[in-house]
Image (spheres, grey):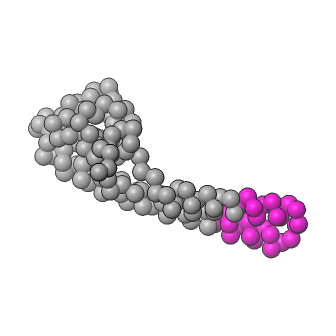
Amino acid sequence: MAEPQTYATHRRWVPYFHFFALPILGLNVLVQIYFLIRHFAWWGVWNILVAAALAALAVATRNMATTAQDRIIRLEETLRLQRCLPPELRSRIGELTTGQLIGLRFCSDEEVPELTRAVFSGELKGREEIKRRVRNWRPDTLRV
């Protein structure tokens, strides 16, 4: 059985991206630069450009996926907050930033009003501060 998710264990590493594709693509840029310095040729400049483009493509692809996921989280959390917050806080949901909504997604329904009040009062600002305050962690095992 998997260890329960907590603040300390909630970050998701995608092994084939973080530990294989990205390091290899980054290393390839450095290797191409090395070969260009050692044996200058115009095709070496092209090789560096292609290597950099591939590395940029990998990073951009990951960023697009996480941005789409953040938009979905924003929608899910807005709907959850409409259900869980008292009326006086419900009308202020639109004031929450995407980062704050992402932080709030880890707290239980019972903790949502307390943490949301802390965000609106300025006591908690960003997603990391919010996540550190969560007592009853609601795991998100589908994060990419």
State whether the magenta stretch is mostly helix, strand or loop: helix
Residue 139 appearing in the image: yes
Q: Quadrant of the C terminus?
A: bottom left
Which residue reaches farthest right? 39
In the image, 1 versus 107, the foreground residue is 1
The percent coordinates of residue 99 (x first, y second) are: 36, 43
Is residue 76 part of the magenta span, yes or no?
A: no
Q: Is residue 123 left or right of residue 113?
A: right
The percent coordinates of residue 19 (x first, y second) are: 55, 56
Q: Is residue 26 left or right of residue 87?
A: right
Residue 91 appearing in the image: no
The percent coordinates of residue 93 (x first, y second) are: 23, 42
In the image, 140 versus 77, the foreground residue is 140
Residue at coordinates 80% horizontally, 69% vertically from top-left?
44
First to last magenta residue range: 29-53
| As drawn, 134 above or below 81 | above
In the image, 42 versus 19, the foreground residue is 19
The percent coordinates of residue 110 (x first, y second) are: 15, 36
| As drawn, 124 above or below 26 | above
Residue at coordinates 15% horizontally, 46% vertically from top-left?
82
Which residue reaches farthest left? 87
Is residue 33 part of the magenta span, yes or no?
A: yes
Residue at coordinates 53% horizontally, 56% vertically from top-left?
18
Residue at coordinates 31% horizontally, 30% vertically from top-left?
133
Which residue reaches farthest bottom? 43
Number of marks present in the image shown? 0
| As drawn, 95 above or below 33 | above
